[in-house]
Image: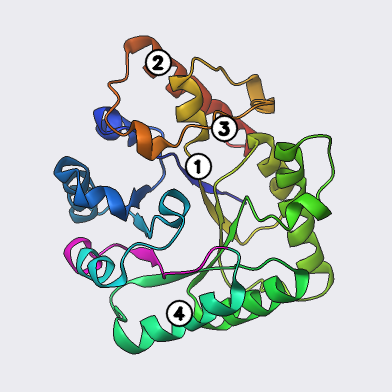
Amino acid sequence: MRIETSHESPISILDKSLQYNDYCYALVHLFETHEQYFDFFKKARNNGKEVYLDNSIFELKESFDSVKYAEWIEKLNPNLYIVPDVLEDGYKTVEKWLEWEQNKDHKKCRKMGVVQGRTWTELVDCYKFMSQAADMIAISFDYSYYQGTGFGHDKLTRFSSGRQRFIQQLIQDNIWNWDKPHHLLGCSLAREFKWYINHNIYNIRSVDTSNPVVAAMHDLQYNDDHGLDTKPSTLLADMIDHDITDDEMELVMYNTRMFKKILGRV
């Protein structure tokens, strides 16, 4: 199996990011303030590169304005976009999806549906809906649910093991849809992804995380295919204007290569 990767990067190295990214992953709210950022993804799309568009809920704590989002989808025409959702509320996420499909559906683009919820029942109900409605199902790294189900002595480890356990339970209970591609949103610890490879969860098709890039910007080097035991709290979106130095770029290339090693691709 092969998991495609994309690591969000500052504008200063977007062109270089094509060397280590399998596809492009854009945050829509940055289109409003950074014309150069939008232009990069538009050019990439026109040149046949796969482009995913995110509704920026992680950065904004709520989905980007739906009217403006629809306008940017029309301008960019991404291969796939994340339908507006609601953090940790599966039922409102389903309502958002139905409202979106009724008023702003974009037939040319594939749709990614994010599983949301705070309890097993709510997460499963949302998963089952997305399993039927979405072209790709997304599972996030940071549900509060994982803090009660994951194992480990710290929050990052519980996030990592919690998502693994959630997916394992979906499979064991015959809820997991093997016929639909899945995407993993973000990560706490990069070594998490080795589990999916080792267990051949073959329809996990892609992951996005700025982790190896932001780590490099904090002078943190991956420990081979173990990655890091910590995680910088800075959001990549807040460092979008950062000018990467030569030393940082060298570390970016190393960390992203080690991330692929975790995925068994080096």
- Image location of residue 182, percent across then percent down: 57, 63
Q: Amino acid at mark 4?
A: Trp
Numbered label attached to residue 97: 4
Q: Give the left or right position of residue 158, taking residue 60 as reference.
A: right
The residue at which mark 3 appears reads as 259
Q: Residue at x 65, y 68 (%)?
A: 117
Number of residues whose C-alpha sits closer than 10 Å to that of mark 3, classed few (under 14), some (14–19) or many (20 or more): many
Label 4 to label 1: alpha-carbon separation: 24 Å
Q: Give the left or right position of residue 166, taking residue 109 as reference.
A: right
- Image location of residue 150, percent across then percent down: 81, 49
The residue at which mark 1 appears reads as 209
Between disc 2 and disc 3, the foreground one is 2
**Residue 11 is inside the magenta segment:** no
- Assign a secondary structure to mark 2: helix
Earlier-in-chain disc, 2 versus 3: 2
Vertical arrangement, residue 242 with respect to residue 116, above or below? above
Between disc 3 and disc 1, the foreground one is 1
Magenta stretch in the rendered image: 73-87
- Assign a secondary structure to mark 4: helix
Q: Amino acid at mark 1?
A: Thr
Vertical arrangement, residue 207 with respect to residue 77, above or below? above
Residue that lies at the very extreme toward the bottom in this rendered image: 102
Numbered label attached to residue 248: 2
Label 2 to label 3: alpha-carbon separation: 16 Å
- Image location of residue 162, percent across then percent down: 76, 51
- Assign a secondary structure to mark 3: helix
